[in-house]
Amino acid sequence: MSTSVSSTSRSGNAFRGLATRAVAVIGAIVGIATTGCQVDVGGQTLPSAYYLQDDIQYFPAGPEFKLSKEAAAQKAYKKETAERNAGYQP
């Protein structure tokens, strides 16, 4: 009789372990399926699963040439040095 009790308790423990693993796997699958994330693959940013529900962000168009201030500063510097050198008599 002790053999039948021990075999029953072993199968009960095995069933509990299997049930725990099954619940953990199902929980992991549900967690992965319901989580939206943004991914960077090969330098390309892929959208999240909820990109259609995201709010729209507006960024106004900037200047075509991004370095306009730097170009203006260089032009002013060249003009200033040309004027300074024009007045210089060696």
Image: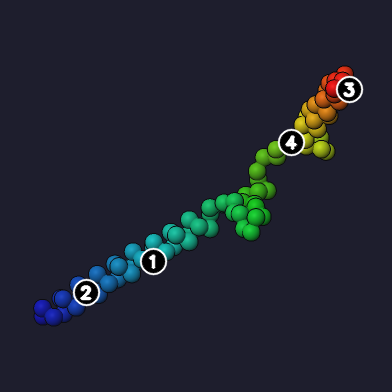
> Which residue in the structure is indicated by mark 4?
59
Dot 3 or dot 4, earlier in sequence? 4
**Residues marked 2 and 1 touching at CB (< 8 Å):** no
Q: Secondary structure at mark 3?
A: helix
**Residues marked 3 and 1 touching at CB (< 8 Å):** no
Q: Nearer the viewer, residue 76 or 65?
A: 76
Q: Residues within 10 Å of mark 1 (few under 14, many from 20)?
A: few
Frontmost of labels 3 and 1 is 3
**Residues marked 4 and 1 touching at CB (< 8 Å):** no
Q: Residue at x 33, y 64 (%)?
A: 20
Q: Residues within 10 Å of mark 4 (few under 14, many from 20)?
A: few
Q: Secondary structure at mark 1?
A: helix
Dot 3 or dot 2, earlier in sequence? 2
Q: Residue at x 25, y 71 (%)?
A: 12
> Amino acid type of disc 2?
Arg
> Which residue in the structure is indicated by mark 2?
10
Rendered location of residue 75, percent (x, y): 83, 29
Q: How many marks?
A: 4
Q: Nearer the viewer, residue 37 or 39?
A: 39
